[in-house]
Each structure stands twice: as structure tokens, then as C-alpha cells.
């Protein structure tokens, strides 16, 4: 599970090691990546909203 | 090494051209508001960041292209990934972007805060002119292009402010926060004055807000910045920023002019209208002393009916009513009656009770006297 999170974070950043990518494609389940991806996207949105409200005050 | 020096020299020349361009006035103006200064300094900061990035990136790129060209036997390296380098070249732009976003956001939030304004001005775009309304002051006017047809056709020499002149500029005070409420009557326009760092769309059915606090008196010119039809290029904006006292005086004058216009000072009045109005004014104000039939009650209050001097001399008559008689009980009406009322009551007294002079006094004449 931790590996999935790390891979999703790497995808957000845009840089991934070739070995890890291969590993994900061989062993990971697509559903897990999609679920974690959506979740993390929501977290990102909330984070940006939080920063915006803090700054606007 | 030689090529490297040549490239670096080239980059330096480009960089040095920037101050030249700024001196020539090709750059955006610093402007005359705190916000416009901030916008300018943001623009310059970000510009220089871009220049540095450009010099570094293109410097390395061109240097590599020449130094390692094929004719000199260079072989391309064949590697696929390098995580550290990739992380670095992703992280650096990220940090630069955040570094630019922080001050930019701070300025932006200032620009979007029109609260606590001292003056509200409604700006309405119309094909192809601007309408300005000083809200709560009963002052409104339309501002249209003043450049002559001859200049536009090219029959006359074009002057310095060609297509940037209007018949009536928007007059604003310095050192006060002025809020703009912007909308349009027809299509989308944009009200743009570079020196004020304001460029705001005016959209039919919407009211956009913006604001300025001008630091220096002067004339600032701008244009419509949204393609709005045939005469889009012929609806300039001119702002005349005045010292506060000067502005207040201007506003009072405009208010009076507007009030007079509303009363009909500028139009030609008929005898009947003036007589009707004059009878009312006389009954309300003059009759208590000069009596309802104009007979007066001498010696205290002279008669107006059959008053020979009155019948013969309009000027004298007007003078008595406008300026009163100092030292006697006849009040001056210059500030208590408006030009229409004065003209009406004078016309009435010159034609009632057998004073059949047949003369009528126009409100415009009275207004002119009052202005002296
Ligand atoms: Cu327009």
C-alpha cells in the first residue's frame, strides 16, 4: 500500500524510477492506483483551499 | 571556448537592450498609483527571472550544439534516465513558480479589494463611447472621441494625442480611494488606463469592480481594450486627476449645472409657462410684503403694480430681485430662488396687474447674471 502511495506521489511530481515503474506494472493492481490517485487529488485540492483561506485572512 | 564566449556576449547584448527599451518608453509604465507601482515591479522581477533562465538555458543549449557538433566527431550519449537530475529540473521551476506566485497573489488580492471607497464611479461602455456616473452625486456625462475627422482622414497633421482625446475626461481626485463599477449597455468593452494599472472588462448584465487611489495629479490616457465593433479604436479613455479641493469645486459646479439642466435653465421658455410659475412664486414669497395684487403698502413696501421704474427698466428690476436692497427689508433672492423661479416671478410682475410690458425674461439670462 505504501508503495502505491509513493508511486502516486511520484506521478504527481512527474518523475519516477524506471525499476519502480516496471515493478508497479508487473505487480500492482490498476484499481488501487486509481483509488489512491483520486484520494490524493482530493487531498491536494483541500490543501490548496486551506493555503488560500489562510493567506486570504 | 571561443564559441562559448561569443554566445555569452550575445546574451549580454540582448540583456543590455532591455534598459534601452525601457528608456525609449516601450516598457509598461510605472504608473501613478501604489498598485501600479507594485504591478510594474512584479513585472520587472519576473521579467529578470525569465531573462536569467533564458540566458542559462539557451546558453547551455547553444554552447552544446556548437561545441559537440557532429562534424567535430561528437557521438551522442545513449542513456535513458537519471532520477536525480530529473528531480532537480522539476523542483527548481516549481520553487521559482511558487516564489513568483507569492508576491503576485499579494498584489492581486490588493487589486481585488474595492472596500472603503471615498467615491463611487459607474463606468458604462457603449458603442463607441464611455458614460461616467458619480454615484450619489447626480453627476453623469458621456465621454466621446474628440479627435477631428480631418486628422482621422489624414487631411490634417495628426497631433501627439491622436485618437486619445475626448470631449469630457473622467475627473478624479488624487489621494482618495475611488471605486469603479463597470458595466456595458451593448457588447463587451474593456476600460484600460495603463498608468493606473486598471484594465477591466465591462460586460452587459454584469457589474465588475475595480479601484484606484491616484498619487499624482495629471492627465492619463487609455483605450477600449476589447474588440467591440467598428469604432473600437475610436473610444479612448482620458482621466483627469485633480487635487482634492480642485476636484470638490469641480464636482459642486457639475452638480449645479446638472441641477439647472434638470430644471430647464437651458431651454427657451414660453410666456404661459413662465407666468404660471411666476404667479405661484409671487404668491408664496413676495405677496406677504408687496401684497397679492402688487399694490404694496407704502411707504414701507413699494407697489409693484403700475411701478413706472419697474415697467421701464428690466435690468433694474432683475437687480432688485437678485441682489435685494441692502439696508431695507427687500431680501436678495440669488441664493434662495433658482434661475427659473427668478425669471418666472420677474416675468409675472412685469405682466400682471396692468403692467403689460409683454416682456419675458428667460431663465438662461438669469443664470448668466447669477454666474457673474
Ligand atoms: Cu469598446
Image: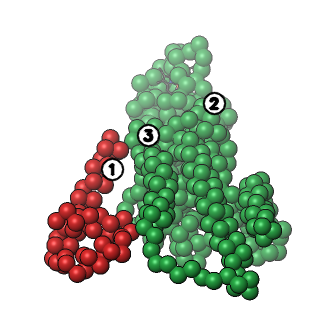
Chain colours: A red, B green
Q: Is residue B355 above or below residue B239?
A: above
Residue B341 in picture, x, y percent from top left: 49, 39
Q: Mark 2 lies on which chain?
A: B
- Residue under label 2: B319
The image quadrant of residue B243 is top right
Provide residue B294's location: percent of width, then percent of height: 48, 30
Query: Which residue lies under the disc numbered 1?
Result: A52
Residue B284, labelled with which disc?
none
Relative to residue B75, is residue A32 drawn left or right? left
Give the x, y percent position of residue B261.
52, 49
Crowding at mark 2 (Cα within 10 Å: few <14, some 14-19, many 20+): some
Residue B312 position (above or below residue B19): above
- Residue furthest top in the image: B327
Quick one: B322 or B126, which is closer to the camera?
B126
Q: Do callouts 1 and 3 point to residues on the same chain?
A: no
Q: Do the residues labelled 2 and 1 touch (CB within 8 Å)?
A: no
Whole-Å distance between the Cαs marked 1 and 3?
A: 25 Å
Quadrant position of residue B186:
bottom left
Q: Which residue position holds label 3?
A: B117
Amino acid at each position: 500500500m505504501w508503495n502505491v502511495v509513493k508511486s502516486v506521489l511520484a506521478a504527481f511530481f512527474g518523475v519516477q524510477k524506471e525499476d519502480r515503474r516496471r515493478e508497479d506494472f508487473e505487480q500492482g493492481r490498476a484499481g488501487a492506483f486509481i483509488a489512491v490517485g483520486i484520494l490524493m487529488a482530493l487531498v491536494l485540492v483541500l490543501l490548496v483551499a486551506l493555503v488560500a483561506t489562510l493567506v486570504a485572512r | 571556448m571561443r564559441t562559448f564566449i561569443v554566445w555569452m556576449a550575445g546574451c549580454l547584448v540582448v540583456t543590455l537592450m532591455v534598459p534601452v527599451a525601457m528608456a525609449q518608453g516601450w516598457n509598461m509604465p510605472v504608473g501613478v498609483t501604489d498598485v501600479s507601482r507594485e504591478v510594474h515591479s512584479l513585472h520587472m522581477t519576473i521579467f529578470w527571472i525569465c531573462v536569467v533562465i533564458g540566458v542559462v538555458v539557451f546558453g547551455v543549449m547553444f554552447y552544446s550544439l556548437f561545441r559537440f557538433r557532429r562534424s567535430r566527431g561528437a557521438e551522442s550519449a545513449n542513456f535513458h534516465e537519471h532520477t536525480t537530475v530529473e528531480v532537480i529540473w522539476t523542483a527548481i521551476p516549481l520553487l521559482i513558480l511558487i516564489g513568483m506566485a507569492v508576491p503576485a497573489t499579494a498584489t492581486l488580492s490588493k487589486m481585488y479589494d474595492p472596500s472603503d471607497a471615498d467615491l463611487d464611479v459607474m463606468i458604462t461602455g457603449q458603442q463607441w463611447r464611455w458614460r461616467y456616473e458619480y454615484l450619489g452625486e447626480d453627476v453623469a456625462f458621456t465621454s466621446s472621441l474628440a479627435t477631428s475627422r480631418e486628422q482621422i482622414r489624414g487631411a490634417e497633421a495628426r497631433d501627439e494625442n491622436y485618437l486619445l482625446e475626448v470631449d469630457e475626461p473622467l475627473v478624479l481626485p488624487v489621494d482618495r480611494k475611488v471605486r469603479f463599477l463597470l458595466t456595458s449597455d451593448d457588447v463587451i468593452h474593456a476600460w484600460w488606463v495603463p498608468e493606473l494599472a486598471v484594465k477591466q472588462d465591462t460586460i452587459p448584465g454584469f457589474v465588475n469592480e475595480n479601484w484606484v487611489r491616484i498619487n499624482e495629479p495629471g492627465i492619463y490616457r487609455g483605450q477600449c481594450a476589447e474588440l467591440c465593433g467598428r469604432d473600437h479604436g475610436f473610444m479612448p479613455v482620458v482621466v483627469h486627476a485633480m487635487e482634492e479641493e480642485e476636484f470638490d469645486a469641480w464636482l459642486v459646479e457639475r452638480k449645479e449645472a446638472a441641477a439647472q439642466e434638470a430644471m430647464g435653465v437651458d431651454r427657451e421658455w414660453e410666456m404661459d409657462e413662465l407666468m404660471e410659475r411666476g404667479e405661484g412664486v409671487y404668491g408664496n414669497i413676495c405677496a406677504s410684503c408687496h401684497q397679492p395684487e402688487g399694490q404694496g403698502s407704502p411707504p414701507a413696501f413699494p407697489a409693484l403694480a403700475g411701478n413706472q421704474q419697474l415697467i421701464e427698466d428690466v435690468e433694474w428690476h432683475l437687480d432688485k430681485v437678485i441682489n435685494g436692497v441692502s439696508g431695507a427689508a427687500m431680501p436678495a433672492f440669488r441664493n434662495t430662488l433658482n434661475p427659473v423661479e427668478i425669471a418666472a416671478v420677474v416675468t409675472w410682475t412685469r405682466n400682471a396687474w396692468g403692467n403689460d410690458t409683454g416682456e419675458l425674461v428667460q431663465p438662461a439670462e438669469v443664470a448668466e447674471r447669477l454666474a457673474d
